[in-house]
Amino acid sequence: MISLLPNLGIPAFRSLAGGFRAIIAFSLMVPISPLFAQKPGAAEEKANRVVRIVTAGDPKRAIEAPKAGLAGSSRTGTGFRLIAGLANPEMFSFESTRSKGTYLRHHLWKIEVAERPDDPIMQKDFDWEATFKIVKVEGDVVMLEAGNRPGEFITIEPEGRYALAPGKNEPLRTQFKLIDK
């Protein structure tokens, strides 16, 4: 029987051995950011638009993605089609406007643009690496949290490359604006 954990509001079930067990996967699927509406399909409402990902602290610095390879910075930035997440439709994926079927993703803690593989087994990992939660900070400032690595965000490195890192303590390196292109 599914119920809520007392005083926490977390879905749980009573195990055969007695006691409650929290359903952890459920908490990862429920968007907690105010950017999302609290209903199914909320991501689709915000998706299907082309944006530039600009650093909040320096609007002249945007994510520049080659057709494939590591993402860097530039003044103009690459346009990304904001779509419902490949791995979780309540989150988002960023498809490059330069090359259809290529997505912004994290791989080995580096941010890159890569083509989605045809192999279904490889697609599953790729889809999670290319799925992000948009966490609203304030106003139009957001942080881009990895869908499969809670607490790790796209972060700009000093040399202008982007990486995935725990970022709550470095707002100037982890906060962005999604500017319509």
Image: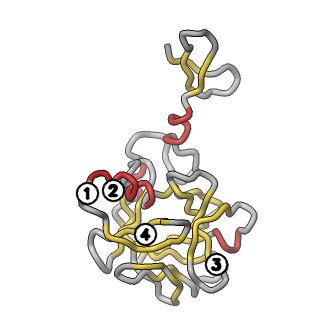
Mark 4 residue element:
strand
Q: Specify the label residue 104 is tagged with.
A: 4
Mark 2 to mark 1 CA distance (whole Å): 5 Å
Query: Could you tell me if residue 153 is visible in this image?
Result: yes
Which residue, given by chain and number where applicable, does mark 3 sit on? 157
Compared with residue 116, is residue 123 higher up or lower down, i.e. above or below? Answer: above
Instruction: Tell me whether the residue at label 2 lies in contact with that at label 1, contact meaning CB atoms closer than 8 angstroms.
Output: yes
Residue found at the very far bottom of the displayed protein: 75
Which residue, given by chain and number where applicable, does mark 1 sit on? 119
- Please name the residue shown 71% across and 68% down the image: 171
Where is residue 45 drawn, in percent x and y?
38, 53
Residue found at the very far right of the displayed protein: 169
Please tell me which of labels 3 and 1 falls first in the chain.
1
Mark 3 residue element:
loop
* In this view, the mark in front (3 or 1): 1
Which residue, given by chain and number where applicable, does mark 2 sit on? 122
